[in-house]
Image (cartoon, rainbow, N blue to C red):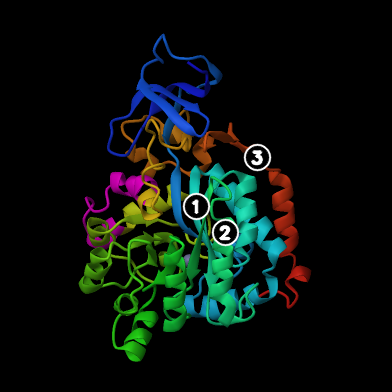
Amino acid sequence: MSAWDLLFTGGLVLPSVGQEPFIGFVAVTGDRIVAVGAGDPPAEAPEARRTIDARGLLLMPGLVNCHNHAAMTLFRGMADDLPLEVWLHEHIFPAEARAVHPEMVYWCSLLAAAEMLLGGTTTVADSYFFEDEACRAFIDSGIRAVAAQGVIDFPAPGAPDPSKAVAQAAAFIDRWRNRHPRLTPAVFCHSPYTCSDGTLVQAKNMAAERGALFFIHLAETVGEVEQCQREHGCSPTAWLHRLGVLDRHTVCVHCVHVDAGDIDLLAAHDAAVVSCPESNMKLASGIAPLPQLAERCRVGLGTDSAASNNDLDLFAEMGSCARLHKALAGDPTVVPASLALRLATEGGAAVLGMEEKVGRLAKGHKADITVVNLDQPRLTPFYSPDILVYAAGGGDVAFVVVDGEIVVEDGRIVTIDLEEVMARVRELARPKNRRNGTS
Ligand SMILES: [Zn+2]
């Protein structure tokens, strides 16, 4: 029997959400988990090239962040405390017009990837412009990514002619398909209110021909719903349905303002949903009917971008998600910790069509492992994994493995020079590099 590449021993293992954690081991060969068990590895187990003593550590499935615009780390804290329409049209879109270029997307996406990996996120679904540069950054960082090229009906960074945006996205998907094992290309139509019906249908057909995921912001604000009612006489969800855009390869982000009929449509077509509670709270967009959505649809969690969150910490997102819905419902049993954990692991994997390979620590699955340091005051004592939702944070992550490769070791990212990345982003944030000054 050939040697294992990597072996964690003596750790508290949470193989999947809902399972009782146990003291045991996890073994990795190549990009796969080859053994998970209680106690010590059996006597006949192969030698391991590297063994990590995981006593005091918890091994769990890597977290899946189902919605981000990674390069927007540049805009973190640039325009806080504003309504979405003002934030987007008066600050973010103008800032993007002057500050987004390929080099910016590379370094700012790399910063985001570093932040996510250090916080235990092993897979991200990203949507932005110049997405080739985001792909390069994700590959360099080691994170697993679904990278979606943005499409919008006005001149955008790298896509000055909106009539060519879908063709550009098609070329992007063709360039990246089957090119790297951790990278899956996709398309992102910004929203039903910034993309015409023609663009939406064309982009969806293009994605369907390629078997690619189609992401879209949907029903994020009351204003969006009212505009859609005025223009099309129906809700944004019903509008997508009428256009034939809803199916199991469509990922609808936000779904804050959806009613029972909308949820019926999403469920009937097996469209996936991503909830971004912290971004929705910060922009005062509202609160998605998550308990109802999670009963009927595949649902994952997303941070959205650092411009509207303002961090990319999925542990914090889980905590906010679980608390928010209890406060709204006046019922502490709503969105239990186990549901928040499930959405951030196997739920997210299902949204991205990856449930067969990520989201659980199981033999044959990809070796995407997040290791939390329990040996510290705020995670002591440990009664159940609920503590991961209510007390843990991204800063508690000790090791991260993606595709069998250690990318975070003893709380430090080992794939990239983090000092250089932060220095580059600080430089990009200097007013002289923003051409028209600050927003
Ligand atoms: Zn978004």
Q: Secondary structure at mark 2?
A: helix
- In the image, residue 102 sits, relative to residue 90, either above or below, namely above
Q: Nearer the viewer, residue 179 or 143?
A: 179
Label of residue 70 in the image: 2
Q: Is residue 342 magenta?
A: yes
Cα distance in 3D space between marks 2 and 1 = 9 Å
What residue do we see at 58% from left, 66% from top? 171
Q: Nearer the viewer, residue 245 or 310?
A: 245
Label of residue 124 in the image: 1
Residue 89: percent from left, percent from top: 55, 80
Q: Is residue 416 left or right of residue 325?
A: right
Label of residue 203 in the image: none
Q: Which of pointers 1 and 3 lies earlier in the amino acid sequence?
A: 1
Total labels: the figure holds 3
The amino acid marked with disc number 3 is Thr
Mark 3 Cα-neighbour bin, 10 Å: few <14, some 14–19, many ≥20: some
- In the image, residue 298 sits, relative to residue 100, either above or below, namely above
Q: Nearer the viewer, residue 249 or 275?
A: 249
Q: Is residue 140 left or right of residue 381?
A: right
Q: Which residues are magenta?
A: 325-347
Q: Is residue 435 left or right of residue 36?
A: right
